[in-house]
Image: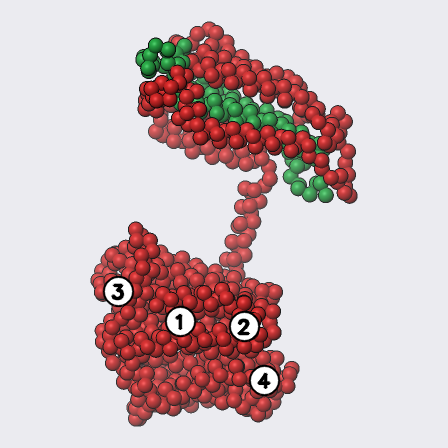
Amino acid sequence: METVLAFVIGGLYAAGLYMLMRRSIVKLVIGLALMSQAANLLIFTLGRLIRGRPALIPPDAAALAGPFADPVPQALILTAIVISFGVHAFTIILVKRAYQTVGTDDLDDMRNTDLLS
Amino acid sequence: MVVAVLSGFLLAITAPGVVRLTRGASGWLLALLPAALTVYFVHYLEPVTAGRAVAVSYPWAPDLGVSLSFYLDGLSLLFALLICGIGALVVVYADRYLHGHPHLGRFYVYLLAFMASMLGLVLAGNVLTMFIFWELTSLTSFLLIGFEHEREAARAAALQALLVTGAGGLALLAGLVLLGQVGGSMEFPALLNGGRAIQSHSLYLPILLLILAGAFTKSAQFPFHFWLPGAMEAPTPVSAYLHSATMVKAGVYLLARLSPILGGSDAWHYMVVGVGAATMLLGALVALWQRDLKRILAYSTVSALGALVLLLGLDTVLSVKAAMLFLLAHALYKGALFLVAGAVDHETGTRDVTRLGRLARAMPLTAVAAGLAALSMAGLPPMLGFISKELLYEAQLQAPRAAALVTGAGVLANVFLVAVAGTVGMSLFFRRRADLPKTPHEAPPAMLLGPLLLAGMGLSWGLFPEVIANSLLSAAVSAVRAEATTVKLKLWHGVNPVFALSVLTLAAGAGVYAARGVIRRVGPLADIVGRWGPQRWYTLLLAGLNGLARAQTRLLQNGYLRVYLMVIIVTTVGLAGFALLLWGGLSGLIGDLSDVRPNEGIIAGLILAAALMAVLTSSRLAAAAALSIIGYGVAIIYMLFSAPDLAMTQFAVETLTVILFVLVVYRLPRFAPLSGRRARVRDALLALLAGALITALVLTATAVPRQSHLASYFVENSWTRAHGRNVVNVILVDFRALDTLGEITVLSVAAIGVYALLRLRLEKPTGREHSPPEGTCRLGEDV
């Protein structure tokens, strides 16, 4: 399954980078969202995949025995998901306000800081 | 001794306050410190002459072999006395010279900081301590040259001096570090004990070249001499102090200090003597056809520095004696002449020697000081300069190699200097014609004290040379030769070859002086060095550097996000792909599809299809839908592969993000194709390349078995120590709780930012107005 996910991650990165290179600022935001999904999946896959064995200690045991999913990448990703949500929320609002202020969603028209004055 | 060095810095800080409180008397007050330091160092004369060097040391960065150590031997003492003695006179002088200047306090900050730095330089007992003070003198020199920063010329000259001496300082640092490594110690006493053993090391030549680069730039040796005449943009007291008596001699000091270690080899001899001789001749010659009094003195200083370097290059007992004596004599007469030049400029309003004249009657005391100093410069008895020149000729006649050539160069340079001395000592004061912008008066006492005292010392020590010969000079020569040496000086040596050379020099010098008008007219035509010389190279190099920086900035900081991304992508794919091919091989790229279950394959396909849709669609809602398909798909993958917490979080967050996105983006305009087809194809290719690299990296990485020590630690301790059964949660809220606190902080900051952006009411643009396009909300309206 790692092989399949490798292509999924590659595809998401390609799509995200392509969107980041667009001139429309909304597409830039979409690119950011794609990139963060891809990065999370990348960490997840590099922690190795294992089916149906979450790192939950059964009520009658003091520790886990046998194979289990690595909890460390999961903890990292959990943090990353929440933080990227914060970043996305902020970016979306920022883009909206920037568009209202500057009157364009073309990044090439946003290079001048003097537009307001 | 530390107090002696640091007190200058302390006084520098308080100087502006002193100036403000004691208008008019601040010079006399501030001069108390250098005067006291002079007395303090005179006390060391006796032990140092008896051969007892004083050393103190404090640990600074012991691991790096750096200690704040000071070392006082004869050489340091000679310099320390010059620095403090002339420093006191210059501080007094500057108060009158810059009378009423709004930034006099600032001037004293720089000047006193320079004095302390220069003291630190000559007293340092550790090569790195010395280097730090060396750089401090370059910095304070920069500030002092650019003191009148409103003038473009002053700024350019300051920058030039800083760049030239700073570049030399870099070379010096490398040389000193190498020297410390090869010599086994950073301390001067230990290095000096090692003697010339270093010279057989293979790194000797690089060390020598680097250190000479530092010394030659600092002491304005050809071809780095050009910054010194430029430095004349500084106020005249600065020129007298830094750019003739003390700072420019730091390179000479360094050569003298290190000559027991580095000197005596063929490489040393040819480079130091060669550069010194060239500088000596060039400076003396160019001084002849200058019209600006200060530039005349500057070029003659260049010549004197060349002579000093030449003498140290000869590396005989006699040449070191001559060097130390000339160092002292030159500091006395050149300091006096610069101060006189400042007084003349101050009183007449011009420094052009073709306009100056007839000043003897209006400024009799200044004329006396100038006359005495000029006599010393020309090398006439009974001045100290006479003894110094006799000794110089003697050392050159006994040069170990090419004595005739060296002596010839020395005599020629001195002939020119005699003519220069005539100009500054006689022509200014006794020439019959004069064309002055102001009616001159005698300079005030504060501006007379320095020149009279310095010139007077040149006279009295010329009459009674044994006063300094047995103590100060013997100690200095002993330090440079690293063996006990006594210096015996006499004013009158009788008629011998050296005396014959002196007479010849005076006669020829008088001839050149008589022809100075012609030379001044013809000279600039022959000034090849000035037109095609190092100054021009400096200008070209500086312009080239600026041009390169501008072009590079325009290329790299062009303001287009996509260009930045392209650079990053191309670099990453190039480097990482190259490394992957070279070391990873392609064997890991053959994946294993045998364990893929149908439902998982479908999810993966859905994610990829949704990514393609997000890229291709021109509808914002379709893009939002595609994003949510990807988000939920990834969440299902988390769920399938043993990450229930991730899946739950992802479902919640994804739902929120999609709602927010739809609410906001719905009000933004439709996607319009902004870039052309070619740009899109190019970007798509680059993005696919980067995606392929990531895929290859993941395949290569997952082909290697993974071992994690962290996982087993957390699993074993999750219940026993943290009392939680969900290991992922325990990591987040217990083992790595501080990280989670940081995460919460980020979220709160983002929330505050979102709220602030929503409430923000921008002021209506003035002048250029534009109404927001249709379908968008007004400023300040809630979403």
The colour scheme used to paint the residues is by chain
Q: CA distance from mark 1 to mark 3?
A: 21 Å
At which x and y percent is residue B362?
Answer: 58, 90
Q: Looking at the image, is mark 3 or mark 2 earlier in the sequence?
A: 3
Residue drawn where x is 28% and y is 61% of the image? B187
The residue that mark 4 highlights is: B356
Chain label for disc 2: B
Disc 2, SS: loop
Q: Looking at the image, is mark 4 or mark 2 earlier in the sequence?
A: 2
Q: CA distance from mark 2 to mark 1?
A: 19 Å
Q: Looking at the picture, do discs 1 and 3 lie on one chain?
A: yes
Chain label for disc 4: B
Apparent colour of chain A = green
Residue drawn where x is 73% and y is 39% of the image? B763
Instruction: In the rendered structure, find residue B235 and report the number of the disc placed on it.
Output: 2
Instruction: Indicate whether B321 appears above or below B57.
Output: below
Q: Judge the density around disc 3: few (<14), some (14-19), many (≥20) Cα neighbours within 10 Å.
A: some
Q: Nearer the viewer, mark 3 or mark 4?
A: 3
Residue drawn where x is 41% and y is 10% of the image? A52
